[in-house]
Every structure is written in C-alpha cells, then in structure tokens.
Amino acid sequence: MDKPHKKLDVWNISMDLVQAVYQVTGLFPDDEKFGLVSQLRRAAVSVPSNIAEGAARSGVKEFCHFLSIARGSLSEVDTQLDLAVRLAFISPDKRQDLDAMMERVDKMLYGLMRKNNGKT
C-alpha cells in the first residue's frame, strides 16, 4: 500500500528529526524518563504523525490544518530543547544541530501550507 506522506520530503526529514531527538534524549538523566524525555519524544513524533494524517485526508483544507498542528508540535520541541539546554541536559552545540533540522522542517511545512492554501 503506497502512502502519500512517504513521498513528502518534509515527512522524511521530520522522521530524521524524531530519530535525532530519541538519540539525544537517550542521554538525559534517568529521573527525566517520565518528564522532559517523554514530552520531547511525544512532541517530536507528533510532527511526522500529523503530516501523515493530513496527507491521508481528502481535502486540502484538512491537509493544511494538520500541517499547522505539525508546526505547533515543532514549536513544542523547540521550547523543550530550550529547557534541556538550560538544565544542561544537552550542549548548545547539539542544540544547534537540532535547530538546523527544525528550521528546515518548519520552512518546508510553511511552504507546503502556502502552496496548498491557494487550492482550498
């Protein structure tokens, strides 16, 4: 079964972001397992999940709605990574690597929303 979201570059790159978040949170203190680790991972997973759900919907308006939710989840990841740096769970250098990925995903989501908003 061929899924439409798997053809989207933004979905693939957001999957890479999820993988990177899982790797970096694996290094967090054990007592954060049910705190920031869980929050960060869920927010990161929400990005490609909402892209996939939107791509499976029948209308462009619905697709854009789910892309918007994905952008919101990306903002959650951003905030939670700020906290992780403040708490010294990750280094500013590692944060910059994740920032580059998030910026790319955000630009792609925004561009896809702009492209499709004219089709509603």
Image: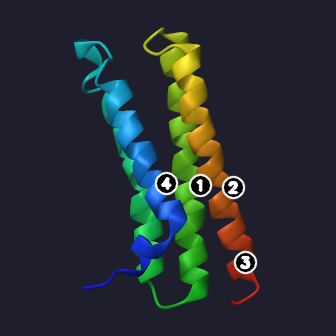
Whether pointer 4 and pointer 3 mark residues with C-beta atoms closer than 8 Å, the reply is: no
Indicate the secondary structure of the residue bearing disc 2: helix
Q: Residues within 10 Å of mark 1 (few under 14, many from 20)?
A: many
Q: Is residue 43 visible?
A: no
Q: State which mark lies toward you, 1 or 2.
A: 2
Q: State which mark lies toward you, 3 or 1.
A: 3
- Please name the residue shown 57% across and 52% down the image: 72
- Left or right of residue 29, residue 96 in this image: right
Q: Looking at numbered disc 2 in the image, what kind of residue is underneath it?
A: Lys
| Mark 1 lies on residue | 71
| Mark 3 lies on residue | 115
Colouring used for the render: rainbow
Whether pointer 2 and pointer 3 mark residues with C-beta atoms closer than 8 Å, the reply is: no
| Mark 2 lies on residue | 107
Q: Earlier in the sequence, mark 4 or mark 1?
A: 4
Q: CA distance from mark 2 to mark 3?
A: 12 Å
Q: CA distance from mark 4 to mark 1?
A: 14 Å
Q: Residues within 10 Å of mark 4 (few under 14, many from 20)?
A: some
Indicate the secondary structure of the residue bearing disc 4: helix
- Along the line of sight, which residue is nearer the eye, 70 or 26? 26
Q: Residue at the top extreme?
A: 88
Q: CA distance from mark 4 to mark 3?
A: 19 Å
Q: State whether residue 96 is above or below residue 40.
A: above
Label disc, if present, on residue 13 of the rendered structure:
4
Q: Earlier in the sequence, mark 3 or mark 1?
A: 1
